[in-house]
Image (cartoon, rainbow, N blue to C red):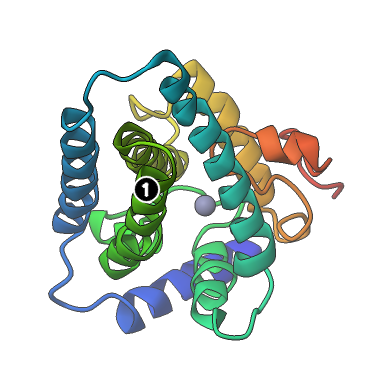
Amino acid sequence: MREQAVAEYRETYRREEIPANYRGLVHLCFTFGSGIAVVIYSAGQLDQVQAAQWLTVPITLLYANLAEYLGHRFVMHRPVPGLGLVYKRHAGQHHRFFSHQHMELEDIRDLKAVLFPPVLMVFFILAFAFPVGITLSLLFAGNVGLLFVASAVAYFLNYEILHLAYHLPGDSWLGRRGLIRRLRALHTSHHDPSLMSRWNFNITYPISDLIFRTFRGSGASPA
Ligand SMILES: [Zn+2]
Ligand SMILES: [Zn+2]
């Protein structure tokens, strides 16, 4: 029954949410092309980084892991005034398109249901990464701001690669990597409708899930 519901929703989503001129490959290239360009440009501007300044990298990555966790748990799975679109895209669309029994996309156009929309990515970089980077440059040093931007955008790209890998066929080259297989099992468990609003909110590495005790491992829900 659930299988039928996912199949029917996929048809509805493809018909109503994916424009005829949508190109999955263009979406993929935009995400990684622009993201990698920002990382390379920021890293290329670094100048004689001092030892303490390198600490910006692990701190940013931990902060990004927390932001990923909080955003997923409290914005993507709960309707927040002003951010309803994010809730609708994730809980209302992504989780209906992919259930724990149907994790794989079937067509390159299905990337629309996996990757962040380009407009949100541009918003994320312009409204979040750059202003914080500039603020850190003014407060500490230019290198700190640049390391923040490079690390934050690299983390976002890592998020997109991993989340995409979880929704590729399990026997794909990416899907067969040991670490990805284990992380994929956690996300598969999160896609179980009976578990999704309570467990495994980290999409990448379950650091915040472990801290906030929402790590459930990869077990399925009781039948
Ligand atoms: Zn997913
Ligand atoms: Zn979710």
Q: Is mark 1 within 8 Å of ligand 2?
A: no
Q: Amino acid at mark 1?
A: Leu
* Badge 1 density bin: few <14, some 14–19, many ≥20, Cα 10 Å: few
Residue 1 seen from this side = no
Say whether residue 91 is left or right of residue 24: right
Quadrant position of residue 175: top left
Q: Nearer the viewer, residue 103 or 182?
A: 182
Q: Which residue is mark 1?
A: 138
- The reply to whether residue 39 is in sight is yes
In the displayed orientation, state which residue is furthest to the top: 51
Quarter occupied by the N terminus: bottom right
Q: Residue at x 54, y 37 (%)?
A: 204
| Figure label count | 1
Residue toward you, 55 or 86:
55
Residue shown at 33% from the left, 74% from the top: 14
Residue 130 in picture, x, y percent from top left: 32, 55
- How far from the left and from the top, in percent, is residue 46? 23, 28
Q: Give the left or right position of residue 9, taking residue 73 as reference.
A: left
**Residue 173 x/y as whole percent:** 33, 24
Q: Position of residue 179 (x, y in %)?
A: 52, 21
Q: Where is 215 relative to 82, above or below?
A: above
